[in-house]
Amino acid sequence: RIQILFEVMLLLLLLLVAHSTSQFCEKESCPQYASFPEDTAGRLRPHALFSDNPDEVYDSELKLVSGEVPDWLDGTLYRVGPGLYEFGNRKVTNMVDALAKVSRWSFHKGKSPRFSTSLLRSSMYNRTMAEGNLVPMMHLGQMHPPLSALEIAKVILYDDLPDNNNIAVWELVSKGATITAESITYIDLDYSTLAFQRKYIPKSNDKHILTKEVLSASHFTRHPGTGDSINYKLVIPLDKGWFSGAATPEYRLYRYREHEATGHVMADLIGKFPINAEGFRVVHSLGATPNFVILPRFSLVIQLNHPVDSSQNIKLDKNAPTIIDVIAIEDGKHTAFKFDPYVAQHILNTFERKNKKGELEIVVDYPTIIDVADAYDGECIFELLDIIRLKDPSFSYRDHWKSFTEFKFRRFVLNMDTGESSVYEFPQMWTPRVLQVEFPYINDAYRGLPYCFVYLQTWNHAANHAMGIIKINLCEETSIGWHDVNKFPVEPIFIAAPNATEEDNGVLVSPVYDAGSDSSSIYIWNAKNLVVLAKLESEVNVPFTLHGIWISGV
């Protein structure tokens, strides 16, 4: 009996150690996980990524430096991000506020790969060029000099829906790439020339003259069956519901479609639900399954503290619960699930499944910061994108924003039959622990469906902003990584191989800045093992780009 008791205790001890090391471990004890650099020796800071980049080129040939481009690659990678932080006597300091720049890398069989990059010809850009100064705008970071009272009034009265979209790219229409932001206003660009085509607000089929539409997610989601683009609009009633029928603000979910005859983009209502003042949240991304739309409201709350300075309006509230709203596509029925406070931005994926009891569950996966309790109330996570701090070697992210540089993948499970919910915490599948693991991308064919693989950018602020690529297998809870000294990749985009039957059969593409040679190249990796297949250098440098999309055949 003593022997049996000893063996049981030993087994429990081993299980405890295994659980502990699966949550946080060092390189030697976690060989199944990717590891990334922690030191600064020999590492340069990528200042060019966070600086003005006005250079424009059109249809320039990409120079093959090494490797071979897969002969089946046919389409174009589009990416958008900041281009100009300063013009005339005014400047901004946050990536989200800089005048937008769009880049494209085109691959077609039998033709040389091509590259173009251009500042977005938005009305804000055109007015800036005409006036000789960066125009007043709603901003998330600092503006120097600060806006005067008269300039603030002008922004409120004439420019409350800015069109400086520099966050994401989407395939919304048939004749161009759509540039988005946290706005209901979109800009379409010509597929080939990146020329401005039009600026518009999709017309909602339930729009009332006494309501105001104010926000949408930067990231659309796509229905896994129909391919429809889905997003939300935050709708504010101007009449307390007397005529509009909306007594309080509402989140409304829409299916977006392009009118065949006119080309206009329409928004057809799927469902809606009311919110109170505490319900305003930053919703940067959302998800869709075959039968539901999922809108997550994490603990980044929206307050009305300043008319144009959004950094004062977006705050972390450690007491604000996370609410995940589910809208049934068939009848618009709304179900809400409440969780502890969490902070997250970019959805990994969501899908439906049946549990062992045969009950319907919705799974929602997000990279979240590890512990909201460690953060300071009132912090704005978007301050991580402040270029003054990014270029300051004396600024320590670990000291000031440690909570925003430690990530953990969490799986939110919503039981649609019982109304119960739970959270599964994946082990930390990388080292070091203090590593920003974000900007996820998966195989588009698996969006809204069960999946295993996700690809992300890694970013170690403490190691001179060392960046890398990580591939995580959520089914087996393993990972592999890629990094190279003074090479700085951004969000990796997955492109499936033709007729692929395996989820990870394809390639990853991303622009990579080389701080050693001060040059930019497009890298192509084998998605299975992260081996570099090809490297092609562009004529001009590419600044930091926030998000992108691959559009086949264009």
Image (cartoon, helix red, strand yellow):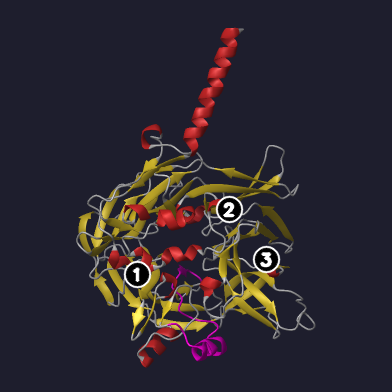
In the rendered image, residue 124, in percent from the top left (x then y), is placed at 43, 85
Name the residue: 67% across, 59% down.
Answer: 325
Magenta span includes 432: no
Q: Is residue 168 left or right of residue 261?
A: left
The quarter holding residue 57 reads bottom left
The N terminus lies in quadrant: top right
Question: Label 2's element?
Answer: strand
Residue 279's mark? 3
Magenta residues, as a range? 146-172
- Front tag of 3 and 1: 3
Query: Mark 2 or mark 3, which is nearer the start of the sequence?
Result: 3
- Front tag of 3 and 2: 3
Q: Is residue 479 visible?
A: yes
The C terminus lies in quadrant: bottom left
The quarter holding residue 291 reads bottom right
In the rendered image, residue 22, in percent from the top left (x then y), is placed at 48, 35
Distance from Cα at disc 3 to Cα at disc 2: 22 Å
**Type of residue at label 2?**
Thr
The quarter holding residue 513 reads bottom left
Distance from Cα at disc 2 to Cα at disc 1: 29 Å
Task: Report which residue position mark 2 lands on.
Answer: 350
Residue 104's mark? 1
Query: Mark 1 or mark 3, which is nearer the start of the sequence?
Result: 1
Q: Is residue 42 left or right of residue 179?
A: left
Q: Nearer the viewer, residue 541 or 523?
A: 541
